[in-house]
Image: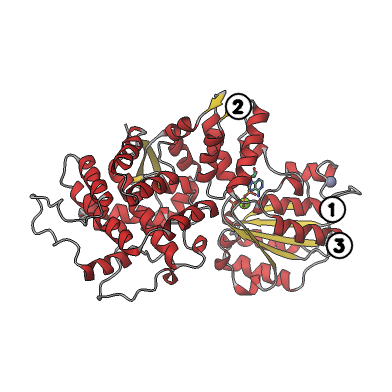
Amino acid sequence: MYQALYRSFRPEVFDELLGQEHIEKILKNQIATGTTGHAYVFCGTRGTGKTTTARLLAKALNCTSDGDRPCGQCEACRAIAAGTFIDVQEIDAASFTGVDNIRQLREEVNYPPVTGRNKVYIIDEAHMLTNAAFNALLKTLEEPPANTVFILATTEPNKLPATILSRCMRLDFKRVPEETILGLFKRICKETGVDAEEDALSLIASNADGSVRDGLSILDRCIAGRKSLTRDDVLFLLGMAGAEVYIKITDEVLAGNTGEALTTFAGVLSEGKEVNRFVLDWVEHFRNLMVVKFTEKPENVINLSRENVAKLKAQSDSVNMDDIRRCIETLSKALADARWSPKPRVLAELAIVQMCSGTAVTGIEDASRPAAQPAARPAAAVNRGDSFVRPAAKPAAVEQPAAEEKPPVRTSTLVEPDPVDRKLEDIWYNVMQSEEIPALLRMSGSVLRDIKHGVFTVQLSNEIIKSMLENERPLIEALMEDETGKRLRMEAIVKE
Ligand SMILES: Nc1ncnc2c1ncn2[C@@H]1O[C@H](COP(=O)(O)OP(=O)(O)OP(=O)(O)O)[C@@H](O)[C@H]1O
Ligand SMILES: [Mg+2]
Ligand SMILES: [Zn+2]
């Protein structure tokens, strides 16, 4: 039977764990010196090895090898990997809600291990625990029973009570560097006999945005049923323009290379990207350039891998704020006008030409729109520039004082809203902003089509993105419930 890559490639020993050397070092040392703690919190982005490391630690605490622990070979190690070791329990906090669960855990904790040396409770998605469960846990952590270890794993440590955090050793998992993920991909392709271009694999690695699991699942979908994989295949399969294309076209625009920029743009469209989506994401790119300019540690504010942030940073150093503002305004204008135009592509091309020649937004006046604002008043421009820093991007990002009293507006509100769509767009925007959404999905231009009869319909650009969305069903349905206050079922459709 076929097993997904991210299941078949779960590290069995510390050496296979990627990109978490700081954690590996601490744990290995504790294991070697017998100084492991009673309680740990593993935090960090999705798919970076929290559950995997929890299992490694559980194995090490029960491994019978004389050499490095865990060995991954002994009976205990294998049973833990298979999930059949009685003394190691994995609890999914989301379903661990009942009074009975909690009572049972509190009683059970007092018994010594059955077959192993240590009992280990791995509590996944720990931020989902109920207050009752946290309280029960707290009692146990206050007087930790001998030979029992708790490992709480979570993407949202800020949702754990301080009383719990203060009793645990906290280890923060980092996004895994692109290079490291690329190395893993190369190995996998070699082992599975897929002849893949390095560029193709780099592209996937960069879209994994530091999550090994996301990377593996994109890779899985791209190589399914293939013997070879090119960069073009990946672009086609994912129906997207990679983050790099924005860096490239922006370079071309800023250098005034009109011809090259138009060619790049045409290339993007021929790969199936929608005009408006591309322009919107390009605005987002300029917003990122701006944030990077004003932020000391942009990787904390911008949801991209370190490599992509580094590329952004390099570009942002070579562009001034006036250019950023001018480009954002020109693109926003094109986007707004596209609403009334049967030919959005021409407007986007016109915007590119204008950006290349360094002129401001004047000129794309549309007759069908009453009283369009006189273009590029400097005061208004400052204010608009500011407004691209969304509330989600911590305020530290930009320190310019607001020039006028005006509520913050989000990028997409620059498109004249149509009342119904606006609301759906807002809801979906918020859902997609969640840290837990895979980066590729966030960038893929999904659209919330409607909500009716207890069902919300999401439209995706292709089957791969659709299956990624399906994968996140529980998460997305929960986020939608947060947004709408209603329990809704998700329906995913692919656009013709
Ligand atoms: N640091 C890593 N090194 C090697 N493989 C990894 C790493 N992180 C994740 N993986 C791969 O991704 C899969 C899932 O990882 P894991 O369950 O440990 O992630 P997680 O951090 O617990 O994610 P989540 O927050 O979604 O629970 C693993 O089976 C493995 O294939
Ligand atoms: Mg996990
Ligand atoms: Zn072992």
Q: Which residue is mark 1?
A: 114
Q: The residue under label 2 is which amino acid type?
A: Val
For marks 3 and 2, the one nearer the N-term is 3
**Identity of the residue drawn at 62% across and 67% down:** 134
Q: Is residue 346 left or right of residue 17?
A: left
Q: The residue under label 3 is which amino acid type?
A: Gly
Q: Which residue is mark 3?
A: 34
For marks 2 and 1, the one nearer the N-term is 1
- Local packing at callout 3 (Cα closer than 10 Å; few below 14, some 14-19, many 20+) is few
Q: Secondary structure at mark 3?
A: loop
The quarter in which the N terminus is drawn is top right
Comparing labels 2 and 1, the label whose residue is closer to the camera = 2
**Identity of the residue drawn at 83% across and 41% down:** 73
Q: Is mark 1 within 8 Å of ligand 3?
A: no
> Where does the image place residue 266, in percent across and percent down from the top left?
31, 36
**Identity of the residue drawn at 55% across and 39% down:** 217
Q: Are marks 2 and 1 in contact (CB under 8 Å)?
A: no
- Local packing at callout 1 (Cα closer than 10 Å; few below 14, some 14-19, many 20+) is few
Can residue 485 be seen at all in this image of the molecule? no
Q: Using the image, determine if residue 318 lies above or below residue 220.
A: below
Q: Which residue is mark 2?
A: 194
